[in-house]
Image (tube, rainbow, N blue to C red):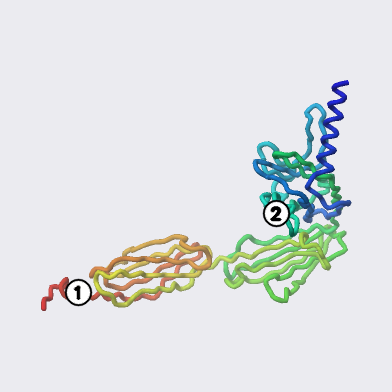
């Protein structure tokens, strides 16, 4: 009798937590497409103390009597050691709600804080019941919502080179299954008018659109999209960002032309390239060149920069230039002369 009473008390406690949970999910059946992303909307309706708490999202929770706890597939967790995320959902679920610290002020005036998640790269096996559990000074479980993932008749594949050398040909390929009634196309997202690129062919298995162009440095960072015609789902669009490797432009050398011995000066050198260049400040002599200073990857692409500050002596007089070198080539700046004037006393003149 006592055991039966304990079971009922546990069940009543669970019902109480579910019915009074401050975490409210958007009700109803949820429908999503395979390969897309879907947001499970969650709102915090009452103040929740997140101090020393952890919380996690579950799929298909099930009460285990002997453990007096729920078992489920954990899809998102703030404490992976106590509630590890299932490998099937790792890197596919992102929290897009409000910081949990804001949950403490859910009763204040204004919009309610959110506790939503976004599941991406959806699979048919993701269909099921989802809920949120909070474990802290209080334990809360939200109600469940049901997500149904439907088959995608037009799964897209978008292929292109990870990087291409300037003047080489870039070929982008956007394709889908032949049974798909919608033709795939490529758009240049970077262009203001988002010009559609055409040129399709079809075989027994796939419908394919390709686009080719000769790469220039101006194409570096250009973005193309692959999607089916009349697509309204932004998560079913595939993007490729073009990376173009090119040798350094002529480095720009900036320095004083005439200084006094003992004066501190700075010589600057900048260049544009990708990958980043190694910049070397050189000084010429009647004989072979001598290395002064070298900087590698001081700043990120596309501008590379070197700065060298020193106190001038008479031996620093001479001609200077900057050399930039990366995997695609090298380039020298123009040479500039540094004239060093000495103080009269240091030069041995007395008046």
Residue density around tag 2, few if under 14, some if 14–19, many if 20 or more, within 10 Å:
some
Secondary structure under badge 2? loop
* Residue at image coords 28%, 75%: 259
Judging by the rendered image, the residue that carries numbered circle 1 is 343
Q: Residue furthest top?
A: 1
Judging by the rendered image, the residue that carries numbered circle 2 is 98
97, above or below 251, in the image:
above
Image coordinates of residue 206 in percent, x first then y, are 81, 59
Image coordinates of residue 262 in percent, x first then y, are 25, 69
- Judge left or right: residue 186 versus residue 164: right
* Residue at image coords 23%, 70%: 314
Secondary structure under badge 1? loop
* Residue at image coords 85%, 21%: 2
Q: Quadrant of the N terminus?
A: top right
Q: Residue furthest bottom?
A: 351
Image coordinates of residue 178 in percent, x first then y, are 85, 60
116, above or below 301, in the image:
above
Q: Quadrant of residue 32?
A: bottom right
Q: Quadrant of the C terminus?
A: bottom left
Image coordinates of residue 321 in percent, x first then y, are 37, 71
Q: Nearer the viewer, residue 41 or 287?
A: 41
What separation in Å lies between label 2 and label 1 (alpha carbons)?
66 Å
């Amino acid at each position: 009798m006592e055991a039966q009473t304990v079971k009922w008390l546990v069940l009543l406690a669970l019902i109480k937590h579910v019915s009074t949970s401050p975490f409210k999910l958007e009700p109803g059946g949820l429908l999503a497409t395979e390969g897309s992303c879907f947001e499970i909307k969650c709102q915090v309706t009452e103040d929740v103390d997140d101090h020393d708490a952890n919380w996690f999202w579950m799929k298909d929770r099930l009460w285990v009597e002997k453990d007096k706890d729920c078992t489920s597939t954990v899809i998102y967790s703030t404490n992976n050691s106590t509630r590890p995320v299932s490998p099937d959902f790792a890197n596919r679920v992102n929290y897009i709600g409000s910081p949990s610290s804001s949950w403490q002020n859910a009763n204040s005036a204004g919009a309610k804080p959110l506790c939503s998640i976004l599941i991406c790269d959806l699979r048919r096996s993701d269909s099921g019941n989802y809920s949120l559990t909070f474990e802290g000074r209080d334990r809360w479980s939200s109600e469940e919502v049901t997500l149904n993932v439907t088959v995608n008749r037009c799964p897209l594949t978008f292929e292109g080179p990870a990087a291409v050398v300037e003047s080489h040909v870039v070929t982008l390929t956007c394709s889908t299954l032949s049974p798909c009634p919608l033709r795939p196309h490529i758009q240049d997202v970077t262009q203001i008018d988002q010009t559609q690129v055409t040129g399709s062919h079809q075989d027994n298995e796939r419908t394919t659109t390709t686009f080719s162009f000769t790469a220039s440095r101006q194409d570096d960072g250009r973005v193309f999209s692959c999607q089916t015609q009349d697509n309204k789902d932004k998560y079913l669009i595939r993007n490729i960002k073009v990376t173009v490797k090119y040798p350094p432009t002529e480095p720009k050398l900036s320095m004083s032309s005439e200084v006094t011995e003992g004066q501190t000066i700075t010589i600057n050198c900048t260049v544009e390239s990708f990958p980043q260049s190694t910049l070397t400040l050189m000084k010429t002599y009647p004989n072979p060149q001598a290395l002064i200073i070298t900087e590698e990857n001081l700043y990120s692409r596309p501008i590379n920069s070197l700065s060298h500050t020193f106190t001038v002596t008479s031996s620093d007089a001479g001609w200077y230039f900057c050399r930039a070198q990366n995997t695609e080539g090298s380039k020298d700046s123009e040479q500039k002369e540094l004239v060093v004037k000495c103080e009269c006393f240091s030069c041995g003149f007395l008046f």
